[in-house]
Image (cartoon, coloured by chain):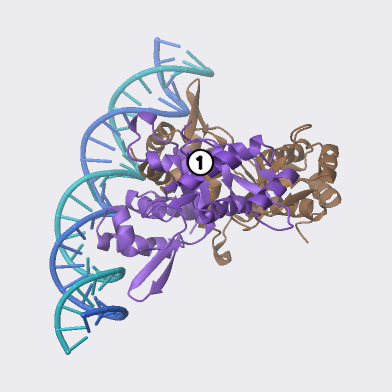
Chain colours: A brown, B purple, C blue, D cyan
Amino acid sequence: MNDVARMARVAGLIGDPARANILTALLDGRALTAKELAFAARVSPSTTSGHLARLTDADLLAVEKQGRHRYFRLASPLVGQMLEAVMAVAGPAPKSIWRGSEALRNARTCYDHLAGRLGVALADSLTRSGHVALSADGGEVTDTGHAFLCEFGAEPAPGKRVFCRPCLDWSERRPHIAGRLGAALAARCLERGWIARQRDSRAVTITPAGSSGFSETFGIDLNG
Amino acid sequence: MNDVARMARVAGLIGDPARANILTALLDGRALTAKELAFAARVSPSTTSGHLARLTDADLLAVEKQGRHRYFRLASPLVGQMLEAVMAVAGPAPKSIWRGSEALRNARTCYDHLAGRLGVALADSLTRSGHVALSADGGEVTDTGHAFLCEFGAEPAPGKRVFCRPCLDWSERRPHIAGRLGAALAARCLERGWIARQRDSRAVTITPAGSSGFSETFGIDLNG
DNA sequence: TCGACGGTTCGGTGACCGCCGAAGCGTCCC
DNA sequence: GGGACGCTTCGGCGGTCACCGAACCGTCGA
């Protein structure tokens, strides 16, 4: 099998709507059962089973057996990054036909970090206050940023140089913070109860505590 | 059209072998005619025409008309990054069946920067000598690195903070340097005559001057 | 032990899509 | 002007594949 053929095979697997639904359902890093994925993909269990077999065979998904359930998750962060990259190219739908995805566009998780308007606002805030420096090529935590993040409780790698991976947000078309720092930020916000995961969705809700917290600490007010 | 459906559509476009060949042929940033792409895709001109229309319609390719020729190129660097991401997941073919792609694995361009063994060796060298710091999340040019790169003639952004984007090499499965710095390095190596583009391929050849140059300046000896 | 449930396998059906050759359209050059 | 060339459109063919329902296997709980 050729290199290009291998690429085509992987892309082709993402290229089917049912499988694309399965993969995006797993994009937040959770592990879901075959049945849950069948619901997400909107196809029958038997059809889903076939898709899952192919995705697993191609090492896009990893599977873990627990009793009579089989839990599927993305095989590696690399898969998540690939999906993000495709999303970034596919771009957002025209504004006029946004339907029901408003919550998703407002705040969501993206494998392990925050995205959507909240993610972008967080990146903007940290950039504006000089705590991180971002460009299309990469980003870095500044000295003041390091202190700030330590106090916030999201010190991603103690004592080590910290980079942040910029990740183009497909709905906002602006970068948000991914990588180790992005994961630490999201984890800390969850820990503080500022955000809460929604069931069966990558969307997250901003709690009242989060609303004031994001406002005070980062100067973010998504309703403004 | 749903967000996920849009992603699936883009992925599906990459998912066909002929189209994948077309896209990878354009991955080095050049603009090629429809006929050249038909040759690259190994399908008839009529079939190629259909593929090109679909790729252009989906904004994966941009087209420029010149007389009776139509020149196609990747619509944006984002498309190149997406292809790299898919390649990284698809991974390298098992070593036993490498066929004819040896030159490609040795040294090639990847949109605008160097990849393959040469690209990885360059990244290793710059890291080892402390001129750049790299991690999976990002990278940065150090102070000594800035001076070094200025002298080499590959100062990517005068006076500005320079990040480098790490890019997982699909054949080596190790990071090489992409982004603005990667582009500047590749351009400078070409300018110095250290490397030469091959016709009809993303592979580059290392010239005799390059062989000694890479050895003296970066301590790279790919034959060793 | 016996249903209930999660998941897979199988067979059949239908649609989509990639492929080509032939014909048509516009451009260039002799 | 006429022929060569680059590219596109059209029609038809064939293969692949997504889909479902029914039957089957293994696990859990009553």
Q: State the residue in front, B3 or D21.
A: B3
In the rendered image, residue B155, in percent from the top left (x then y), is placed at: 66, 54
Residue A195: name its quadrant.
top right
Q: State the residue in front, A185 or B111.
A: B111
The answer to whether residue B156 is seen in the rendering is yes
Q: B67 left or right of C6? A: left
Residue A172: name its quadrant.
bottom right
Q: Where's the N terminus of chain A, which quadrant?
A: top left
Q: A47 left or right of A134? A: left
In the rendered image, residue B115, in percent from the top left (x then y), is placed at: 50, 44
For disc 1, the chain is: B
- The 10 Å Cα crowd at callout 1, few under 14, some 14 to 19, many 20 or more, is many
The answer to whether residue A39 is seen in the rendering is no
**Which residue is drawn at the image coordinates 35% and 29% (left, top)?**
B96
Give the answer, above or below, for where D28 lies relative to C29: above
Q: Where's the C terminus of chain A, which quadrant?
A: bottom right
Q: B190 left or right of A127? A: left
Which residue is disc 1 drawn over? B118
Secondary structure beneath dot 1 equals: helix
In the rendered image, residue D23, in percent from the top left (x then y), is placed at: 28, 27
Q: State the residue in front, B44 or A68.
A: B44
In the rendered image, residue A33, in percent from the top left (x then y), is placed at: 51, 32
In the image, what residue type sits under mark 1?
Leu
All told, the count of numbered labels is 1
